[in-house]
Image: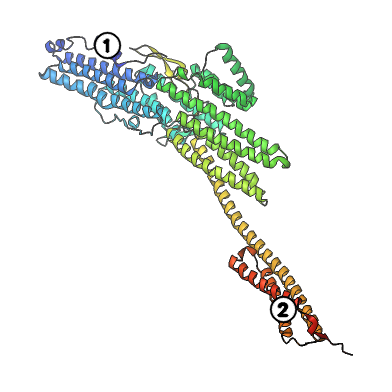
Amino acid sequence: MHSPLSQTKLIRKLGRSYFQQNWAVYFHTHQTDADMLLFQSKINEAFSMIAEFETTILLNGDYCLISMSDWEKQSKELMDFLQQNLQNLGQDNFGNEATEYFLTNLLNPLEADILPSISYLLQDLDRQFGYKPLGMHHKWLTTDIRNKVYSFEGYWALKVFVNALRVVALEHFRFEYSEKTFRDLSRWKREVDKINTFQTLIKAIQVKINFLLRKLVYRSQCDKGRVNWSYSYNNTDEITFTLQTIDKEPLLDRWEKVIEVHYGLVDDYKILQRERIQEMILKSAQFHFEKSHARAKIYKDDIGSQHNLSLLQVDFTSAANQYTVPFDNYAFKISSNYLFNNELSFNVHVALEEGNELSTDTLKDTNREFLKKIDSLIADTKNFQNQTFVKNFFPWMKLCEALSEKMEDVSKKLVEVANFELYEKLKKRLDEVVSKFEQSFEWSNVRKLMPFQLPFDESQSDYQFATSNFGTFNLFFFSGYLVPLNYSQMAARKENIKNKVTKFDILSSVYDRLKKVVETVQETSETVKNAERRSIEVIAIFSAISLFTVGSIQMLANVQIGSDPMFFFKMVSSYGFCLLMFAILIWIISRPNLGSIKWFHWLVLGILLLISATVIFTFVFTDLGQVKIINHP
């Protein structure tokens, strides 16, 4: 990795070219109009050098390597250097006029526009690379030079800087497939095309804008969306953006071929993907993010190997110590999440396929295994995202869609109680995963998160631009060859999942109510059955009592009481207690639930039964010597 440009180098350049020691002495002795023009030319050229330097660190990516503390220190050194040279101009009429020009056309635009804009950008980058809530000062959108009085040279130098800043910041914080992105890039492209100074920097900005526009068109092809976008200027000129109308830079052709092959936009793309892997392996044995990106695609969508995906993740993780710079560390964590997401997506697909292939006999075991796998994947996703601080929405979306698909299948067979129990278990997990999905989608959408991120060295394109004072550099793309996401489409998928959840909630509520109705019907039916059975039992017992009574009356009709006057009383008492035992039996039988009979009921019943048994026993063993049986003719 190269060392970033430093403001110290700029100070040295300014000192050698414009602000040599005692540079102002000349103007103390030469104060003609021609000398003032010479002074103004020197200040304009100095500011142009400063603007060129600051624009260069935006286009070559050095801003990603500069810490906020280093930037503030270097900016202070630059301002102190210029302030010191300003003080050398003196306070006579010429000196006052020169001081005013110095302030208006160099110090003020530097202090008010250039340095604060980059400071705000670095603060937002610090939040982005540290996964902190984004403050988004948006100074890169609000910098406006239309109403400021600058020299001709200064105005256009600042114009170049502002356009470079806008494009760079858009690529970091809101590069997504949307009409607004197309509109802003096309408007800035038109504005840049009108600038005739700093030709090499302007050309680099044009190349950057064109490539970003082409990547938006590629995303449209991936999603099979709009074929082209049109933008009208002043309601007159309309420009249509297609791959044929947007200028293509030959030095970015390698990246364009990678896009077409990786995203499957050409015929026989799988063959080309395999050939690309072999070519990268033969070209270099070193570890590259691009190589891991390509291998993950092959292992998941072509070979279909969970083992290879796991090994790739292990291989990638082992290289963590190489990426300690904040930008590279950010790229490493984003990309490791991409590899994790591919492995999870593959495992979810396998879990669903296994459930569909097994027979009905093993369905219960299959459902149990599916739930275990889902629980394991949920836990793995939580742990991985907590370790990397990257709340990527993709794994939660895949889990939501897998659970929804499974619930759709189970919902067709809710007649069986076992299926409803499975349905409720799936719904519980879906509710948890949907909540995570919504949170992570918001986190990703605010940042316009790219699913994969290249490290700094691999984000340098093959296109080079030359500067007048600082050398030649490769044009930097934060997004590399990656095509942006269509967050509107992702939001639509999220809403579709939420609609399914609502449907599942309604279905669950209806089934609960239906279940209660069925239970009530079953209870009523059971009560009616029990009542019918008890009625039959009571009738049977009543019949037995009637027969017993009739038989007893016939028997007593042939009995003559002898010398024992208590015999009749004993016999009637015994008969009465027999009827009491029958009544107790009927009372017990007629209870809907024996468990509702309290202990004191059983105590009273026990006492009555004991008395009845005693009375009956006494009568049975009464001495019948006093009783005479009469035979009627």
Image coloring type: rainbow
Count of labels in the image:
2
SS for tag 1?
helix
Residue found at the very far left of the displayed protein: 92
The correct choice, above or below, for 22 with respect to 289 in the image is above
Q: Disc 1 marks which residue?
A: 12
Q: Is 441 left or right of 94, judged from the image as shown?
A: right
Q: Position of residue 150 (x, y in %)?
A: 25, 24
The structure residue drawn at horizontal position 72% and vertical position 82%, both measured from the top left corner, is 572
Q: Nearer the viewer, residue 341 or 170?
A: 341
Instruction: Locate residue 484, reporting x and y percent.
Output: 49, 29
Mark 2 residue type? Ser
User: Is 514 above or below relative to 568?
Assistant: above
Residue occupying the far bottom of the picture = 633
> 207 or 396, which lies in front?
396
How many residues crowd around disc 2 within 10 Å: few (fewer than 14), some, or many (20 or more)? Answer: many
Q: Which mark is residue 574?
A: 2
Can residue 271 be seen here? The reply is: yes
Seen in the picture, residue 174 relative to 3 is either above or below; the reply is: below
Q: Residue furthest right?
A: 633
Q: CA distance from mark 2 to mark 1?
A: 130 Å
Label 2 vs label 1, nearer the camera: 2
Helix, strand or loop for disc 2: helix
Identify which amino acid the numbered label 1 is placed on: Arg
**Residue 56 percent coordinates (x, y):** 36, 18
Residue 614, which numbered label? none
Q: Position of residue 469 (x, y in %)?
A: 33, 12
- Identify the image quadrant of the N terminus: top left
Q: Nearer the viewer, residue 558 or 20?
A: 558
